[in-house]
Amino acid sequence: MHILWILPYLPWPTTSGGKLRQYHLLRCLAARGHRITLLVQSKVPLDAATQAQLEPLLERLVVLERRPLRSMKTMLAGLLSPAPLLASVNGYAPAFSRTLEQLLQQPWDVVQLEHSYMFEPCRGPLRKHQGGFLLSEHNVESTLAEVTYSRLPAVFRPLARLDRWRYQRWERQVVGAARKVVAMTEDDARVLAAYSSQPVAVVVNGTDTGAFSEVVADHAARRILFVGNFEYAPNIDAVEWLLNQIMPAIWAVEPQVRLCLCGYALPAQWAERWPDQRIEWLGFVPSLQPVQASSSLFLAALRDGGGSKLKVLEAMAAGLPVVATPQAVSGLDVQRGTHYQGGVDTEALVAAALQLLANAPLAHSTGEAGRDHVRAQHDWQHSADQLEAVYAGLTCA
């Protein structure tokens, strides 16, 4: 198929779950012979390494730089636009609209827009496109925004409530305008279906199971791992919960246990805020497998967030026993006590972590059950199968 794929960020390097999803779906579909033009509005310039990684997958790569976040146009749009803040940041981009309009003059089997917040500069050109567009929504953004806004000072809360209302209205408009909508989980699909004239399809998150197949957790390491993109508010909340409550309770029983924190945009000031020598501040690492192989378990203390969590899928694919909240495994058809251990509060997470650290057979069986589940249900090839089925429905309609 001839596919025009529209993104509000470059999908390489894979420093976030969204980028990881985009890169691997592009990789899988390109390997199946689809001809893909990737149109990107990026907040960072295209560098040679990113270009070299992406171009072999694509028929064409078109990258336009987004205006700076602190520009006057962005600030005025955020205050005065009927679009929500996130859509304003990515919108009101005439050069991007013109480029899309030119591209849409070509014949396309599928025009795919990633994220509703990228719709504003696409609205005019897509309205004229007779074939319509597919919207791939990674979260219910109006709900996810509440997590970010909850961290703002109280004086900004009224503006936050206004922006959430704007996003709920925006969501209805964009979902309603799309020819087909794709969500990542059944729960998100049910929410978005209320705004759509037809059922919302699900294309699950995945992982490259082969890349993690040789990893063996090190039970003797006494090392707990957490991975996340720290530009994402729920991950910041998870670290605060880990370091203020969960780890102190674990250390009271097992003082030799270490905590390793990996991920993009790890704040430098955290090492000063929590100056414990048992905390390893690794930040972004290009390959997780060596870190996973020297860890005993993965602890996902997530209280908020949407979609399904790629960090959890990767940990399970590597055979790491996972301790998690229900939110951390939302969107995944996994069973507590079989595929993961955990619970909703500090006491349950601490008890589960200590049990796995003390019981090597249980840790091994939990890790392998999670690995088997991810192999069967969440390999990226399975996700690509689901997306191709959506494409087939569009072309047959």
Image (spheres, grey):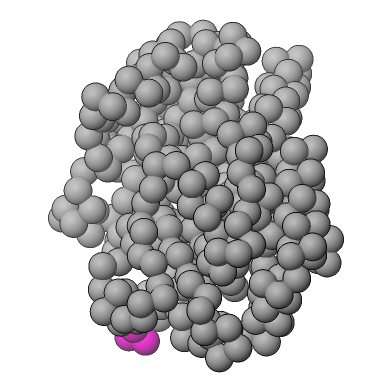
Query: How many circles with numbers are drawn on the protein?
Result: 0
Query: Where's residue 33, x and y in %?
Result: 59, 9
Q: Magenta segment range?
A: 152-156
Q: Quadrant of the N terminus?
A: top right
Taking the magenta stretch, the answer to whether it contains residue 283 is no
Residue 247 shows in this picture: yes
Q: Is residue 65 left or right of residue 83?
A: left
Residue at the spot x=39%, y=42% of the render?
286
Examine the rendered structure and indicate whether residue 101 appears above or below residue 46: above
Examine the rendered structure and indicate whether residue 302 appears above or below residue 394: below
Residue at the spot x=54%, y=38% of the render?
21
Q: Quadrant of the C terminus?
A: top right
Of residues 326 and 318, the one nearer the viewer is: 318
Q: Quadrant of residue 168?
A: bottom right
Q: Residue furthest bottom?
A: 252
Examine the rendered structure and indicate whether residue 113 appears above or below residue 320: above
Query: Where's residue 162, x and y in %?
Result: 44, 71
Q: Is residue 373 left or right of residue 307?
A: right
Residue at the spot x=66%, y=45% of the render?
317
Q: Is residue 124 left or right of residue 200?
A: left
Query: Where's residue 314, x and y in %?
Result: 60, 47
Q: Residue furthest front?
A: 220
Examine the rendered structure and indicate whether residue 388 appears above or below residue 303: above
Residue 158 shows in this picture: no
Query: Where's residue 117, x and y in %?
Result: 45, 47
Q: Which secondary structure dominates the residues rendered in magenta?
A: helix
Residue at the spot x=59%, y=19% of the render?
29
Q: Quadrant of residue 324?
A: bottom right
